[in-house]
Amino acid sequence: MSGLGKGITTASIGRLLKNRGYEVTAVKIDPYLNIDAGTMNPAQHGEVFVLSDGAEVDLDLGNYERFLDINLKSIHNITTGKVYKSVIEKERRGDFLGTTVQIIPHITDEIRHCISRAAQEEIDGGRAAEICLVEVGGTVGDIESMPFLEAIRQMHGELSPQDMVLVHVTLVPVDAMGDLKTKPTQHSVKALRELGLQPDIIVGRSSEVIGPQTKRKISAFTDVPAKAVISAQSVPDIYQVPMELEKEGLAEVICNYLAIENREPDTEWYRLISQDYTNRVTVAIISKYGIEDVYISIKESLKHAGRALSTEVNIRWLDAEAFDHRDLADVDGILIPGGFGERGIEGKIQAIRYARENKRPFLGLCLGLQLGVVEYARHVLGIPDATSEEMGPGTHVITIIPDHENAPGLGGTMCLGDCTVTLREGTMIADLYGRTTTVERHRHRYEVNPEFISDLEDAGLTFTGFCGERVEVCELPDHPFYLATQFHPEFKSSPTNPSPPYIGFVAACKKNKISARAR
Ligand code: GLN
């Protein structure tokens, strides 16, 4: 079922294999009819993650990238929409001339083709991976998942046994008496078997440790050896999951199935994740959604930067529509994330003003940069009706990017994916990166109106990063830490590679905390 942690389990398995020197890639299958996640409401579906090639994908691809330190592409997210679109286009071209086009074999063939193609794709310009993880989203028995599970069954039948291992992630709930219940696992394995799939490994997700007795019981009902029944107890930090699975001996079980050597693992990841924090800061994120999954990459990036600085970052989620500056009195930093539409923007603008005037660390991301510019134009430049074109009438200090005006719809038509940003030498952003160019990811339709750049600069806001002519970064020199980016640095942060703007922000929060004590 959704929300169980299949994505983290998949990413963690990848990490176990990567720690053993295997090259790993990952594919996510989403059984919905949307072509991609780009037009889906993040409040329902969670964050829309953006890949370097500009694909707007399921948030699990973000987990894969963070755990595996690789850059995935659009083809690594297979949706029912993409599969059907491709088959229908082939039908229109006449590729199937004479045949009746059907779910089996045409759709299942297409799914298998998509999986193989993604598996064989070179990773970051290098070789193709040795092992491909394929996560099938959804729940066994859902109508939507059927063609995918059928395609997997066909592949399983054709490949030699050591070329494919099936891992089934199940819920192992705890009843009112505190006992672990194996019934949901028994039933879902039964449902899988009806589809012709017998799992090789069961990963049981539970709030408690699944002990040997429960494992034996699951084993007896499912024919999965007790050694291959893995306890995946909830842990406070997702990056601990590989370590927990390591202790459970999952890597050995997988290597045995795949007939590959269970090499001595590199333990750097485990060392990194086990370090203790010596400091704590609180960061406010002002958002209109009220659910944290919308900003999972930001949350994780703060964690990555925090780890690098031995600082635990606590997040205070504040509702943009009920903004009250008193909620910011004791926070060490203020973060305004990306977003769309008018709802909640006035609260965010007030929060930025508070951060600017009270000299609190401020990090603005995408919409956060745009609202920072609006705030500055209103309260420093003296344009009271300054706003973004996205929000309606007023003086548009933020305008639509010219070639985006007449986009043929909303799906995949934003400025998306990698851009090379030039950072002005001697600025805070160039210092943070330690260089004068960086490649970061975009997801926006609007930009700083070039007509206002010089006025804003004269009034003290400095633009320190550009992609061509387009503003990418702004800073306020006369402030302890005021940084906003049009790009989304959070899409490229990982525990092993924390993002420089986030490092700068958390470091500034740490400093703020020290000076707050003095205040
Ligand atoms: N809505 C703004 C735009 O489209 C900002 C987008 C974002 O924050 N991702 O430009």
Image (tube, rainbow, N blue to C red):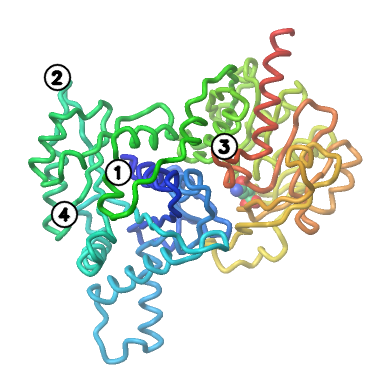
| Gap in angstroms between the C-alphas marked 2 and 1 | 34 Å
State which mark lies toward you, 3 or 1: 1
Q: Secondary structure at mark 3?
A: helix
| Residue labelled with disc 1 | 252
Q: Earlier in the sequence, mark 4 or mark 3?
A: 4
Q: What amino acid is labelled 3 in the image?
A: Ser
State which mark lies toward you, 2 or 1: 1
| Residue labelled with disc 2 | 177
Q: Earlier in the sequence, mark 4 or mark 1?
A: 4
Q: Does residue 340 show up?
A: no
Along the line of sight, which residue is nearer the eye, 296 or 308? Answer: 308
Q: Which mark is residue 198?
A: 4
Q: Secondary structure at mark 2?
A: loop
Q: Secondary structure at mark 1?
A: helix
The answer to whether marks 4 and 3 mark residues whose Cβ atoms lie closer than 8 Å is no
Measured from the top left, where is residue 460 in percent x and y? Answer: 87, 36
Q: Which mark is residue 301?
A: 3
| Gap in angstroms between the C-alphas marked 2 and 4 | 31 Å
**Relative to 30, is 409 above or below?**
below
Q: Which mark is residue 61?
A: none
| Gap in angstroms between the C-alphas marked 4 and 3 | 38 Å
The answer to whether marks 4 and 1 mark residues whose Cβ atoms lie closer than 8 Å is no
**Residue at the outermost left position:** 220
**Residue at the outermost bottom position:** 98
